[in-house]
Amino acid sequence: LNEDYLNQRMQLFEKYYIPSISSQKAENFKAIVLFHPDTPDKIKEKIKAYQNREDLKDKLIILYTPKEYYLLVKDVIQKYTSNKSWIIITRCDNDDGFAFDYIETLRNYFVPINGYYINFKKHGRFVSAENKYYEYNDSSGHFLSYVKRFYSNKPFAVEIFSQPHNWAKRNHPNFLNIKNKKTVCLEVVHDLNVVNGKNERDIEKQNNEMLERFKINLT
């Protein structure tokens, strides 16, 4: 593993993702964060400190896992829920973030249909090189959520982790695109991005709108 690269990704994780979890209004949720098994000890120490932080210790679950991560994810879900329970899974990269009311808003759209996808169309985008915040619409499912009935005796694998962002919209009939008024998801454009970038249809907004919604600190 490239330690310089990992340190940069860790900085993004700390700056954008961690506030997303600590600031949530909702209770009774778990943020399962996957790390490579060979993560250096220095970074593991940092991660452990976050796990022990008062505002995160009941929310943040860290897994050092190989590619068969879904087996460990199933174990975690089984620990915190009962057989045949309904769960909602949201995919989020370590350089992305959620607004403080994301989980609360998401739960308002829960429908007990197994394999039901939920996408919020209006997203936020912060371009770090410009220090500018934008809003944009994305109906393809960049920040996709998935409603699933959990069975402890059945294999656990969901396409939301393994497929491209737009897979569900193109291939699944139970896909809800929500025209949300306020942004609930934040994409960060930075030097390490491979795909994400600014779009000509982005609408520039004031940075304080982002700071208020996502509870991040740019200093």
Image: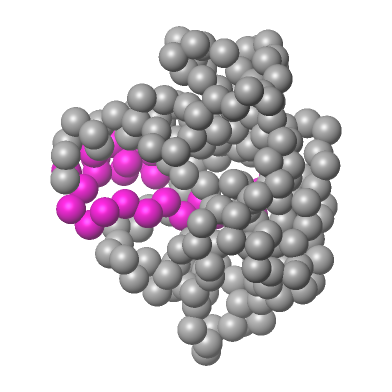
Q: What is the total number of numbered labels drawn onto the structure image? A: 0
Q: Quadrant of the N terminus?
A: top left
- What range is drawn magenta here? 25-52
| Direction bottom: furthest residue | 153
**Whether residue 146 can be seen here:** no
**Whether residue 111 can be seen here:** yes
Residue 204 horizontal/vertical position (percent): 68, 15
What kind of colouring is applied to the model shown? one colour
Identify the residue at image location x=52%, y=87%.
154
Is 162 included in the stretch rendered in magenta? no
Image height check: is 179 above or below 127? Answer: below
Image height check: is 33 above or below 121? Answer: below
Identify the residue at image location x=60%, y=55%.
166
Image height check: is 102 above or below 199? Answer: below
Image height check: is 103 above or below 219? Answer: below
Residue 107 horizontal/vertical position (percent): 76, 54
| Direction front: furthest residue | 200
Residue 187 horizontal/vertical position (percent): 55, 33
**Image side of residue 14 versus residue 127, left or right:** left
Q: Quadrant of the C terminus?
A: top left
Is 34 included in the stretch rendered in magenta? yes
**Image side of residue 68 versus residue 56, left or right:** left
**Which one is nearer the viewer's eye here, 8 or 19?**
8
**Which one is nearer the viewer's eye here, 136 or 151?**
136
Identify the residue at image location x=74%, y=42%.
121
Identify the residue at image location x=47%, y=18%.
128
**Which one is nearer the viewer's eye here, 171 or 47?**
171
Q: Quadrant of residue 105?
A: top right
